Image (cartoon, coloured by chain):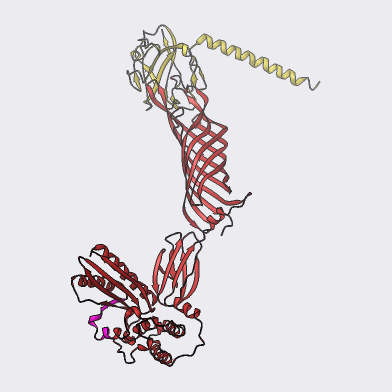
Chain colours: A yellow, B red
Amino acid sequence: MRYAIIPSFVLGLVFVFGGCAQDSSDGASEEATWVYQNLIFSQTSPISAAQSGDIKEPAFSWTSTGYKHVVCAIFKSHIAITNNQIVNEEELVWIWHSGLDKGRDGNISFVDGVTDLSSNTVPEDLSTGTYYWAVWAIDEGGHVRASSTEYALTVQ
Amino acid sequence: MSFDAPRKARHESQRIPVSDKKVPIWLICLAVSTLSWNAEAKVETSPEARVETTVEAKVEAKTDAQPPPKAGAPAPTSLPASAPAVVKPSQIDRKQVYLLWYPTAKSNDFLSVLTRMAQAKLNALPQVTLKQVGNVPQLRETIEGFGKLEHLDRVSLINIKNQTGFDGLVHIAPTYRGNKLALAISYVDFRNGEFFRERALTQLIDAELFQTLEADLVEFATRIRRSYRVTLKVDAHPEGSEVYINGKLAGKTPLVKEVKAGAYKIAIRKRGFRDFRQNFQLTNGDILRLRATLYNPIAARYLNAKPGLRLDSRLFNLGYRYVYVGADQPALEHLHFFSLEGSLRIRSLDLGLRFGLTSPRTQTPLDTFLGSDQGSVSYETTLMQFQAVGKYVLWEKFSFASLRICTAHGFSYGRTSINSGKVSAWSYSGDVYAEVVSRLFRSGNFSMELQLDVGFSYAGKLPYKEKTFSVFGEGAEVEKSRHLFGPMAALALRFNFFNDIF
């Protein structure tokens, strides 16, 4: 009798907390505006960035990193990272990097970037929706050394 | 090595049996007279005492066995009792050789040239003085008082020396036949009581004639001079060995040196060879011909090699080995190994173990969105080799130089590090190369040598991570490996310890 109490208690805990988790996820899908608070690449130096100007053609600024390879990109969904590598490249909407010969490290405008790395297509204005953007810097050896947190951008 | 110290006169005197014939009165007078002269010489010129004694003994013996005088020749008794001693022995420095220039004809152009040549040549020789018969009063009469030169026997010749002090005489009798010269030259050795050489030449007066006479004069004077001294003729193999006489360096072989009579400690030395040492007691007139082949312990060891296994030496070397492995990923083109090797020499085979270490740091170019080679990956590589080495001696000049064909096989440990981590692997490694060794220095059992290797090397398989640049993050790292193969060259110092040779 004494031993039958413990499994019953555990089952009760599972039931209670399992119900709370379900409630939380449901709430997020309804809001869809939350962002990650940590740097997108782990163990990197922080980059403090900001967005300004027309929301459809935003400009971006951040503290200059000093690295040769700097990237700023806008994704349609949250930026997914696995092993310090962005894995949802197909969600890319707009990208700027220091090899494009437009803009400069720390100050770029929307027209300085491209929609696709391979085609270098000049971007059109952002359509309505919520976007996520971030800035990161890569050293000469191909290692990410600095990154910002993920920022949200909502076009009405 | 040979030792040849001729004492011809003494030997001759020993060979001549003492006669039991009755001794004539005149002979006793001669002996007494000669003895009195030599007693004087012995006292006044002690270095020559032994020579004089030898001559004296010769006179006595020779007298007993003397052949009958030649027809027309004056008997030994013809020695004038009151023959004037023009140059007394007591006035002569016995180290100096006095020769007499004795032309029979009156001076003419040829004779005056010949005389000047002889004076220049002989007076230039050490301890030789040439005097002309005409310049010394009564000398011609004294010599002629003994009779005709060509008829004089040994005793008479020695007596001329005793009376005049001259050691030799060059007798020149020129006659002219048309445009040719008939020249009779006698080189008379008073000291040894013999005719050294007689020449009868009939020819034009030319350079060849003077060359012949010049050579004769030098040889004649040298022979007499050497009879007053000890001549050392030292030769040794190898050539250029140092000769020490009584502890002092006298020169290098081949060496000809005249020394005083006495006791000598002669040593011949050459670095890398065992010293030769021997003591000699030498008297005037001795010619010591010494030919020594110095003992080379290492050479002897190799030459007298017995069949079967034998440990000859233990050696280790420290060196540098370079392998060119070509430009490839990762950018590791040159390998610079520090090498340590220890081996044993068994007959024509060297067997040993080798350790090699290289730790290069390289930058491999990386293509980025800025362009090709805009980035670079830093690799820290460590390559260690553990190999067994076998070397076969193809050619060897004792331990001075050698040529070997070599092979090394073993394991190689390769490790490469980049920022994201390390990869490592063991693999096979092997070398094939030719080796030239030359000795730099040797002392006792120890020898330091220079070693040069040329060949091909497979340094092993090097694992590494190939990095690709990505605009979206760290990029990919793919584990790969590279075979390191290429030509090699090595330079090393060998420290060789020969086994139980000395």
Q: Nearer the viewer, residue B334 or B103?
A: B103
- When asked about the image quadrant of residue B81, the answer is bottom left
Percent position of residue B133, x then y:
25, 80
In this view, A24 is above or below B232: above
The magenta stretch is B128-141
Q: Is residue B257 visible?
A: yes
In the rendered image, residue B237, in percent from the top left (x then y), is placed at 46, 60
Q: Quadrant of residue B407?
A: top right
* Quadrant (top left/top right/bottom left/bottom right) for the C terminus of chain B: bottom right
- Residue B61 in percent (x, y) is at 46, 84
- B446 left or right of B66? right
Q: Position of residue B202 (x, y in %)?
A: 27, 66
Quick one: which residue is furthest to the left in this view?
B109
Q: How many marks?
A: 0
- Residue B30 magenta: no
Is residue B300 shown above or below B365? below
Q: Residue drawn at (50%, 78%), measured in percent from left and top? A: B15
> Splitting the image into 4 quarters, where does residue B426 fall?
top right
Q: Nearer the viewer, residue B347 or B261?
A: B261
| Residue A47 visible from this viewpoint | no
